[in-house]
Amino acid sequence: MKDSPEQQNKIPDTFYPFNLTTIYANVPPLPAVYSLIHMLGNVWLYVADTDDVQTALVKHYQGDMPCIQKNFADYFSIELVGSGIDLREARKRQLLWAYNPICNRKQE
C-alpha cells in the first residue's frame, strides 16, 4: 500500500537544537533518516540516512560539511525508520523531493 501524499510529505515531528549536548542527550547511535535546517529562515539544509545517526550528526557539528556551517544549521530532526535500508532510502527520497535541501543539491 502506498503512502498518501500527506504521509509522504510529512514534516518530522520534533526538531532539536543542533549542539553536542542535545545530540548526545537525544540521539541514539542507531539507523535513521535525519535533517538539518536553519530554523529562522525555514531553510532545509541537508537530508541523509545513516547506520549511526549520532555519529553522523556529531561529525556534521564538527564541520565535516562546510555547506552546513556556511548556512547556519541550528536545528535537526531524526526519524528512526528501522533497520531496513530500503525504508530509510525511501523516506530520505521523500524529504529530498519535498524540501530540496540546499546542501544536497549538486554543486554547479
Image: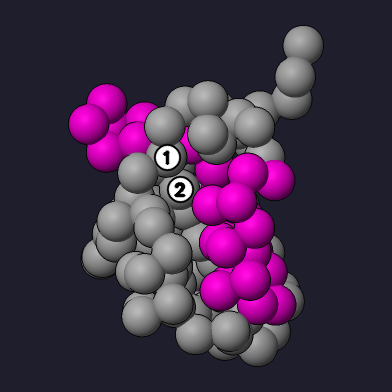
Boundaries of the magenta span: 38-64
Classify residue 91 by image quadrant: bottom right
Which residue is the site of mark 2?
A: 36
Who's the residue at 36% across and 69% down the image?
21
Q: Amino acid at mark 2?
A: Leu
Which residue is the site of mark 1?
A: 73
- Along the polypeptide, which appears first: circle 1 or circle 2? 2
Q: Check whether the beta carbons of the residues at disc 1 and disc 2 lie within 8 A of each other.
A: yes
* In front of the other: 68 or 90: 68
Query: Visible in this render: residue 59?
Result: yes
Query: Disc 1 and disc 2: Cα gap in Å?
Result: 6 Å
- Tell which tag, 1 or 2, sits nearer the viewer: 1
Who's the residue at 65% across and 88% down the image?
83
In the image, residue 3 lies at what x, y percent? Answer: 43, 67
The answer to if 49 sits in the magenta stretch is yes
Who's the residue at 36% across and 79% down the image?
26
In the image, residue 71 lies at what x, y percent? Answer: 47, 27
In the image, residue 15 lies at what x, y percent? Answer: 28, 59
